[in-house]
Structures are given as structure tokens and as C-alpha cells.
């Protein structure tokens, strides 16, 4: 079926970045703390999560960057009596053929275990993305960019249910100041489940305001 839920998300990620070789472009290690709060018309998707992670990145020659991250945390969904623990592993690489063009691929594995009778799950897949940056000086702003992505994932539950998750979208990100931005996004999502009652299609339009610090 289709849904038209409205959703609001607040996300904050913070943590120091350490250079492992004392240079600006070498390997970097970043421990981080992330908090996310979701308010959704469907209470099943509402709740909050807190995660503690460690991210590694390294810029190689020819504009190639490698990255890896691990994260552990807890999720509290509003309509469930028990919390769940999650673990996340992420591996990726990006290539910048020019200073204003970035092409990337990222693989992700998520494992979620409920404290009680919730249906434990695993989600894994890949995300392909491309970003093109532009000079915004003549528009009275800082830089701005257009991005597009395609994500293919599978979600397996302990109950035997298995879902194919496909999504794609495009977004425009504009920096009003050096570290303050607005991002407008449009995306589509499709869930094809082995249990037809869980089949779902969604269209999302979002406006995001953020600060880098």
C-alpha cells in the first residue's frame, strides 16, 4: 500500500577528529556520539536512539577516500514496551575526479536485538551516490550542491520474514553561511516483503536545516 505520513527528525552528531599521522590529509579517527529523535504520524516509526561510534577515514591519491565505521547504541520506539540494542558496521569509498564532483559507494550492515519479544532483525545493502558542487557567490550565498542516490537493501527478521528495500532520491543543499545550510530533498521508497501485508510505497519531500561544527 501507500502511506502519506508526516515525519520530523532531529539528529545531532558530535565528536573530535584526530589525525593519525599529523597531516591534514592522512588517516583520521573520529569517536562520535549521535542522538536522533523521530516524530512520525505512524507511532511505529516514532522514538529516539542514542549511539556511540568510531569512524576511520583516509584520503588516498587521485581523490580517493576510504572510510569505515562501527557503532553501538539503543533504540526506544514509542509503541513498544521494550528497548532494542543495535550494532552498525559501515564501509565505503568515494572518488573526486574534480574538486566539485564526488562519486561514492557505501555498504552497511545493521543488527537490532530487542530486550523482550520484539522481532530481531538484520539489514544490509549498498548505497550509490553522486554529488555536484557549485559556486553560490553570485546568488548571495556560499557553496551549494545537487546530490542523487540509489539504495538497495535487504532486511531479514527472526520470524522468517524477509523484505527487499529500494529507495532513491535527489536533494539540493545550500550553504547560507560558511557552516549553516538548508537541504531540500525528494525521494521514493519501496518495500517488497515476503509477507504481503508489509508491502509499502512512500514518497518523501523534506526540508532540513543544519549547522556544521
Image: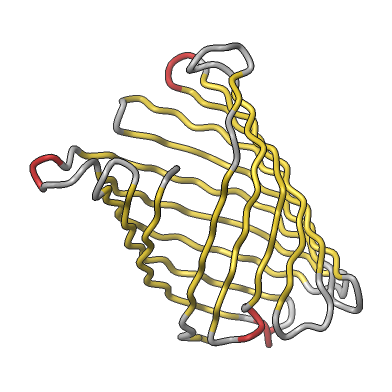
Residue under the point 58% across and 42% down = 106
Q: Nearer the viewer, residue 51 or 199?
A: 51
Q: Is residue 126 left or right of residue 86?
A: left
Q: Quadrant of the N terminus?
A: bottom right
**Compared to 146, does 206 lie above or below?**
below
Q: Quadrant of the C terminus?
A: top left
Residue under the point 48% across and 54% down = 150
Residue 155 position by quadrant: bottom right
Residue 162 x/y as whole percent: 75, 69
Q: Nearer the viewer, residue 14 or 199?
A: 14
Residue 16 x/y as whole percent: 59, 34
Residue under the point 61% across and 12% down = 21
Residue 197 position by quadrant: bottom right
Q: Is residue 97 left or right of residue 85?
A: left
Residue 175 x/y as whole percent: 27, 48
Q: Residue furthest right?
A: 116
Residue 196 x/y as whole percent: 68, 84
Amino acid at each position: 500500500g501507500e502511506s502519506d505520513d508526516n515525519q520530523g527528525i532531529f539528529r545531532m552528531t558530535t565528536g573530535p577528529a584526530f589525525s593519525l599521522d599529523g597531516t591534514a590529509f592522512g588517516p583520521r579517527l573520529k569517536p562520535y556520539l549521535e542522538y536522533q529523535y523521530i516524530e512520525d504520524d505512524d507511532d511505529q516509526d516514532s522514538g529516539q536512539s542514542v549511539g556511540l561510534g568510531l569512524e576511520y577515514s583516509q584520503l588516498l591519491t587521485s581523490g580517493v577516500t576510504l572510510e569505515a565505521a562501527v557503532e553501538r547504541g539503543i533504540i526506544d520506539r514509542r509503541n513498544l514496551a521494550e528497548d532494542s540494542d543495535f550494532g552498525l558496521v559501515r564501509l565505503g569509498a568515494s572518488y573526486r575526479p574534480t574538486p566539485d564532483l564526488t562519486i561514492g559507494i557505501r555498504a552497511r550492515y545493521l543488527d537490532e536485538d530487542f530486550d523482550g519479544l520484539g522481532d530481531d532483525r538484520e539489514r544490509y545493502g549498498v548505497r550509490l551516490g553522486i554529488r555536484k558542487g557549485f559556486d553560490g557567490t553570485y546568488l548571495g550565498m556560499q557553496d551549494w550542491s545537487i546530490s542523487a542516490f540509489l539504495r538497495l537493501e535487504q532486511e531479514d527478521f527472526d520470524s522468517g520474514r524477509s523484505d527487499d528495500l529500494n529507495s532513491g532520491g535527489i536533494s539540493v543543499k545550500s550553504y547560507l553561511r560558511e557552516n549553516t545550510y538548508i537541504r531540500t530533498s525528494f525521494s521514493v521508497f519501496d518495500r517488497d516483503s515476503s509477507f504481503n501485508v508489509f508491502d509499502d510505497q512512500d514518497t518523501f519531500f523534506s526540508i532540513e536545516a543544519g549547522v556544521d561544527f
